[in-house]
Image (spheres, rainbow, N blue to C red):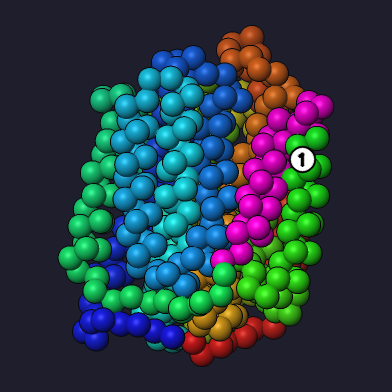
C-alpha cells in the first residue's frame, strides 16, 4: 500500500537526497581510513585497535539493519530515513569531540545505528517512487553516488587530515547531514508504508542482534579461546534465529524469501561475497602506503582514488544496462574482473611500483562497479512491493556484514602476524605477509562469487 500525501512528489529532489545520503556514508568511512595513522598516534591505538574504528560502525549497522528494514516498511520509509539521518548527524558530532579511543568507538557505534536506518530505507524509497523500467537507472545513480563518495574520500580525507586534523572530517560530514535533514523536512511530503497491526517480533530481533554481535566480535579476535567461544555462540544463535523465524507468524525477517526465491537468496549471497572480498583493501593499502611506502595521508589518497573513480564511472551505466540485459550475467562478469584485480595485488612487496598498484586497483574498481548495480537490481526486482523495505535492508545487511567480514579477515591476519603491536620499521615484513594472506583469501572468495551470481532465473515482479 502506498500512502502519498503529496501527489506532485518532486522525484528529482527525492533522488538528490537519497544520492546525497549514499554519497556521505562511504565518504565518511573511506576518509577515516586515510586518517587512521593520525588517529592512532593521537589516541594511542594499535593496528588491530584501528581496525575497530571501521568495524564498530559496520557491526552496529549489521545488527540494526534487519529490524530497521521491517520497521521502515510498517512505520514509514521516509520517517525512518529522516530520524536515522538525525541520529547519524549527532553521532558524527560526538566522534568529532571524542577524547579517547573508547569515546571514538562509541561514536562510531552510534553512527552505525543511524546508518542502518538510512540503508534500510533509502533504496526502498527510490524503488517506491520510480516506475519498474526506471529502477535500474535510479539504482545505478545511487550506487554511483556511493562510489563518487569513495572517489573523493581518500584525497579529501588526506587534505583535511593534514591541514585541519582528523576531527575536521566529522565536523564537515555533520554539516552536510544537516542539509539533508532540512531537505527532507521541507521538500519531501510523501510517505510509503505498509501498516501492520501484528505484534513486532522482539524475540527474533534480540536473537539476531546478539548472534551477529557475537559472531563478528569473535571472528575478528581469533584465534583467542574466548573469540572461538563467541564465534561458535554467534553461529549457533543464527541457526536458532533461522528456525525461530520460519515458525513465527510475523517474523522480523521473512526467511521464506531465501528458501522460496532462489534469485533473491543467491544475489544476496553474491553481494556478501563481493563486499567481503573487496572492502578491507582500502584499509590495508592505506596502512601499506603510509607505513611501508612512507607516503603522507594526502599522497596515499591520490593512489587509493583509482579504484572508486572507476567504480563510479562503471556503476553509472551498469545499472541502466541491467534494465535490458540479464543482471546475473553482468554481475558474474564483474565478479570475475574483481578476482583478476585481487590476483594482481597478491604479488605486493616493499618495492612494488605505484603504477602496478594503481593498475590493479583500476581493474578491481571496474569489476566492482560492473557487479554492484545489476546485483542490487536483481535483489530489489525479485520481491513484492510490501517487502521492498526488507529487501533494501537485506541487501544492505549483506553489504555491511560483508564489509565487517572483510575487516575481520584483515584484523585476524594482522593479529596473527603482528599480535597487538603497532606497525613499525621492525615488523614491516610481517605486515606485508599478512597483506598477502588477506588478498589471497579475498581472491578465492571472488572466484566463488562468479558462480553464485549466475544462480537463479531473472524475475521481474512489476512492483
Residue 364 drawn at (x, y percent): 57, 51
In the rendered image of this protein, does residue 117 appear above or below residue 128? above
Residue topped by disc 1: 231
Residue appearing at x 70%, y 18% in the figure: 419
Classify residue 6 by image quadrant. bottom left
Residue appearing at x 62%, y 39% in the figure: 407
Q: Residue furthest left?
A: 186
Give whichever of 309, 358 is nearer the camera.
309
Magenta part, dominant SS: helix
In the rendered image of this protein, does residue 135 appear above or below residue 395? below
Q: Which residues are magenta?
A: 200-228
Residue appearing at x 42%, y 35% in the figure: 107
Magenta-colored stretch includes residue 224: yes
Residue 82 drawn at (x, y percent): 32, 59
In the rendered image of this protein, does residue 368 appear above or below residue 126? above
| Residue 2 visible in image | yes
Amino acid at each position: 500500500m502506498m500512502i502519498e500525501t503529496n501527489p506532485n512528489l518532486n522525484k528529482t529532489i527525492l533522488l538528490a537526497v537519497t544520492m546525497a545520503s549514499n554519497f556521505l556514508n562511504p565518504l565518511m568511512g573511506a576518509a577515516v581510513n586515510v586518517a587512521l595513522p593520525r588517529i592512532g598516534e593521537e589516541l594511542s591505538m594499535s593496528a588491530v585497535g584501528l581496525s575497530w574504528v571501521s568495524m564498530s560502525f559496520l557491526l552496529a549497522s549489521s545488527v540494526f539493519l534487519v529490524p530497521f528494514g521491517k520497521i521502515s516498511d510498517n512505520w514509514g520509509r521516509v520517517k525512518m530515513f529522516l530520524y536515522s539521518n538525525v541520529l547519524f548527524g549527532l553521532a558524527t558530532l560526538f566522534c568529532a569531540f571524542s577524547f579517547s579511543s573508547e569515546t571514538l568507538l562509541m561514536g562510531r557505534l552510534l553512527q552505525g545505528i543511524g546508518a542502518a536506518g538510512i540503508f534500510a530505507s533509502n533504496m526502498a524509497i527510490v524503488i517506491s517512487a520510480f516506475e519498474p523500467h526506471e529502477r535500474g537507472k535510479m539504482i545505478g545513480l545511487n550506487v554511483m553516488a556511493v562510489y563518487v563518495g569513495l572517489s573523493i574520500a581518500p584525497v579529501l580525507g588526506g587534505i583535511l587530515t593534514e591541514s585541519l586534523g582528523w576531527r575536521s572530517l566529522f565536523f564537515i560530514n555533520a554539516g552536510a547531514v544537516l542539509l539533508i535533514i532540512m531537505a527532507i523536512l521541507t521538500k519531501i511530503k510523501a510517505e510509503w508504508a505498509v501498516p501492520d497491526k501484528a505484534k513486532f517480533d522482539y524475540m527474533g530481533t534480540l536473537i539476531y542482534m546478539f548472534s551477529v554481535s557475537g559472531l563478528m566480535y569473535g571472528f575478528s579476535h581469533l584465534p583467542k579461546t574466548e573469540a572461538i567461544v563467541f564465534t561458535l555462540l554467534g553461529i549457533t544463535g543464527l541457526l536458532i534465529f533461522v528456525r525461530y523465524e520460519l515458525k513465527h507468524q510475523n517474523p522480523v525477517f521473512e526467511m521464506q524469501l531465501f528458501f522460496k526465491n532462489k534469485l533473491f537468496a543467491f544475489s544476496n549471497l553474491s553481494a556478501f561475497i563481493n563486499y567481503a572480498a573487496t572492502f578491507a583493501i582500502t584499509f590495508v593499502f592505506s596502512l601499506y602506503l603510509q607505513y611501508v611506502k612512507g607516503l603522507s595521508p594526502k599522497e596515499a589518497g591520490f593512489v587509493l582514488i583509482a579504484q572508486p573513480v572507476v567504480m563510479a564511472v562503471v556503476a553509472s551505466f551498469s545499472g541502466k544496462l541491467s534494465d535490458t540485459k540479464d543482471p546475473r550475467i553482468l554481475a558474474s562478469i564483474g565478479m570475475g574482473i574483481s578476482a583478476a584485480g585481487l590476483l594482481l595485488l597478491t604479488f605486493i612487496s616493499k618495492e612494488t611500483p605505484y603504477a602496478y598498484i594503481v593498475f590493479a586497483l583500476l581493474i578491481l574498481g571496474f569489476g566492482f562497479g560492473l557487479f554492484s548495480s545489476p546485483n542490487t537490481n536483481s535483489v530489489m526486482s525479485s520481491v513484492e512491493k510490501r517487502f521492498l523495505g526488507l529487501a533494501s535492508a537485506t541487501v544492505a545487511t549483506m553489504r555491511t556484514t560483508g564489509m565487517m567480514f572483510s575487516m575481520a579477515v584483515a584484523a585476524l591476519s594482522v593479529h596473527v602476524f603482528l599480535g597487538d603491536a603497532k606497525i613499525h620499521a621492525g615488523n614491516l615484513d610481517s605486515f606485508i605477509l599478512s597483506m598477502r594472506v588477506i588478498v589471497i583469501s579475498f581472491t578465492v572468495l571472488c572466484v566463488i562469487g562468479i558462480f553464485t551470481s549466475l544462480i537463479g532465473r531473472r524475475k521481474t515482479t512489476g512492483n
